[in-house]
């Protein structure tokens, strides 16, 4: 019997979620057959079986497991689980003398759980609410979980908290649940029957203990917080996707652990504007009226480099000349990488994805333009794969298309730096004798000070500007 564990599908993957099993439990699988869809911290992809035999699924769909944990077994034959009978029903071992469970049969009386005296008068929806209310009781406690304000309102209204279902965190009953029950006429707990024996002596008031006083203080604080939350109106909770959770974790890690600093530089883009215009003019145009040629030629026209492509190429060439900017920081050491792999930040659906242009310093400007366009389309279609997202040594992030002049991006650890690209816009520039209007943009370089010092970063950023202001070198 061979075990299949959660695979590591990307260099940053720590755990994965099983989205869908593509084979049934007990089905015969072969080597290379698609087995399961797994969502990683970067993308969802299909994992192929490296074994053949009968499949036994261990981890169900929706389960999240760490890399290396068991998800399935494959072997020549999978025996039925010891606690299962041939008809698929679970067998329960009963100790001698223990009460025997009664099988559920049509028409057979079912055991009735202990419930309050008024429970029999509840309607079916109310019984469902009571069942949900059981979730509000913390394990090992016999008290219904409710906020102090909800308890007070329930006491004043004569509402039994055990009959309510909580909508607060962890099934906790809050003020809105009690008010809703009062509006719908929830059953009121019947008062205990008066005793016919002698009246009980009055109980002397007990001195509150320090713990009780602390509980009262916490209860008052909870009431205040609940009142503040109520003032905000209805609040909906949006669960983060695995990708969003990974982004949140990595960005928090970056800001908490990286001593960063930023530099800004203005770039005169007039030469790049002229180069792009010339490349667009020289690109093959589709013959008029030829539909087939139009489709084939559109690919050439679409490959005209954007200004962002030019910045990627300029950064790649500058990284080759400044290897520390192409490094990373790990475990107190600076690692210098031989390949220049530039990540391009892409805004996807409610996430920021960074596909990688590998060996960008060795690719022509046209190759970078075509590859980047394909990567962006794959990101927005949700078809990007983990290998296309890993291995980056530097990142370019551009918000200029949204009218943002400058911004400071967050370093993608463990990379040494990230460059932020602002809007290309005409600006007044002072010449020797007059004011000129030039198309300019601002680059902001954010650096990890453990790898790059101020002077090194300044030289690197100045080299990017030099290449953009004389972009002929980008076409070589």
Image (cartoon, grey):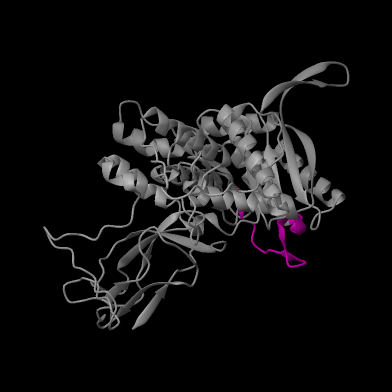
Residue 263's image quarter? Answer: top right
Residue 357 seen by the camera: yes
Residue 355 seen by the camera: no
Where does the image place residue 403, in percent across and percent down from the top left?
A: 63, 26
Residue closest to the eye, 305 or 122? 122
For the N terminus, the quadrant is bottom left
Residue 49's image quarter? Answer: bottom left
Residue at 29%, 62% (x, y): give it. 22
Q: Residue furthest front?
A: 198
Residue closest to the eye, 340 or 233? 233
Above or below, 43 relative to 71: above
Q: Is residue 20 left or right of residue 334?
A: left
Where does the image place residue 122, in percent across and percent down from the top left?
A: 29, 41
Where does the image place residue 182, in percent across and percent down from the top left?
A: 41, 30
Inspect the magenta stretch and tell me whether residue 331 lies in it: yes
Residue closest to the eye, 38 or 34? 38
Residue at 45%, 51% (x, y): give it. 384
Where does the image place residue 9, in percent across and percent down from the top left?
A: 48, 64
Residue at 59%, 30% (x, y): give it. 401
Residue at 56%, 37% (x, y): give it. 149
Q: Is residue 124 left or right of residue 324?
A: left
Q: Residue furthest left?
A: 107
Above or below, 299 relative to 62: above
Residue closest to the eye, 155 or 29? 155
Q: State the extent of the magenta-drawn residues as a range.
A: 321-343
Q: Is residue 137 left or right of residue 464?
A: left
Instruction: Count the labels in the image.
Output: 0
Q: Is residue 73 left or right of residue 139?
A: left
Inspect the magenta stretch and tell me whether residue 357 lies in it: no
């Amino acid at each position: 019997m061979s075990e299949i564990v959660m695979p590591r599908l990307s260099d940053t993957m720590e755990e994965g979620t099983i989205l869908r099993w593509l084979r049934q439990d007990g089905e015969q699988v072969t080597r290379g057959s698609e087995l399961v869809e797994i969502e990683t911290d970067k993308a969802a992809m299909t994992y192929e079986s490296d074994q053949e035999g009968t499949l036994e699924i261990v981890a169900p769909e929706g389960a999240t497991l760490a890399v290396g944990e068991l998800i399935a077994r494959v072997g020549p034959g999978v025996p039925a689980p010891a606690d299962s009978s041939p008809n698929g029903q679970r067998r329960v071992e009963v100790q001698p003398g223990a009460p025997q469970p009664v099988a559920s049969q049509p028409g057979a009386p079912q055991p009735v759980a202990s419930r309050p005296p008024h429970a029999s008068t509840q309607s079916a929806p109310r019984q469902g609410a009571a069942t949900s209310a059981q979730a509000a009781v913390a394990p090992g406690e016999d008290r219904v979980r409710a906020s102090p304000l909800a308890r007070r309102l329930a006491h004043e209204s004569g509402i039994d908290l055990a009959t309510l279902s909580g909508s607060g965190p962890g099934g906790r009953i809050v003020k809105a649940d009690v008010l809703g029950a009062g509006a719908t006429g929830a059953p009121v707990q019947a008062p205990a029957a008066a005793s016919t024996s002698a009246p009980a002596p009055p109980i002397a008031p007990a001195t509150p203990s320090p713990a009780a006083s602390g509980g009262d203080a916490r209860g008052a604080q909870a009431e205040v917080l609940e009142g503040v939350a109520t003032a905000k109106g209805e609040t909906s909770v949006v669960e983060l996707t695995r990708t969003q959770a990974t982004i949140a974790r990595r960005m928090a890690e970056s800001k908490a652990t990286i001593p960063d600093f930023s530099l800004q530089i203005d770039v005169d883009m007039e030469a790049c504007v002229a180069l792009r215009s010339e490349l667009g003019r020289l690109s093959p145009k589709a013959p008029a009226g030829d539909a087939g040629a139009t489709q084939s030629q559109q690919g050439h026209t679409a490959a005209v480099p954007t200004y962002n492509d030019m910045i990627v190429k300029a950064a790649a060439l500058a990284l080759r000349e400044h290897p520390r900017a192409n490094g990373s920081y790990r475990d107190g050491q600076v690692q210098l990488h031989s390949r220049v792999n530039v990540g391009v930040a892409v805004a996807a659906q409610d996430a920021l994805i960074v596909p990688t242009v590998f060996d960008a310093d060795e690719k022509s400007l046209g190759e970078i333009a075509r590859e980047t366009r394909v990567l962006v389309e794959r990101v927005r279609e949700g078809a990007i794969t983990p290998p296309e997202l890993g291995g980056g040594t530097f990142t370019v992030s551009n918000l200029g298309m949204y009218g943002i002049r400058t911004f400071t991006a967050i370093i993608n650890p463990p990379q040494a730096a990230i460059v932020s690209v602002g809007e290309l816009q005409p600006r007044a520039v002072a010449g020797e004798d007059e004011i000129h209007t030039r198309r300019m943009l601002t680059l902001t370089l954010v650096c990890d000070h453990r790898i790059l010092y101020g002077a090194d970063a300044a030289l690197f950023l100045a080299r990017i500007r030099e290449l953009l202001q004389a972009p002929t070198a980008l076409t070589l």
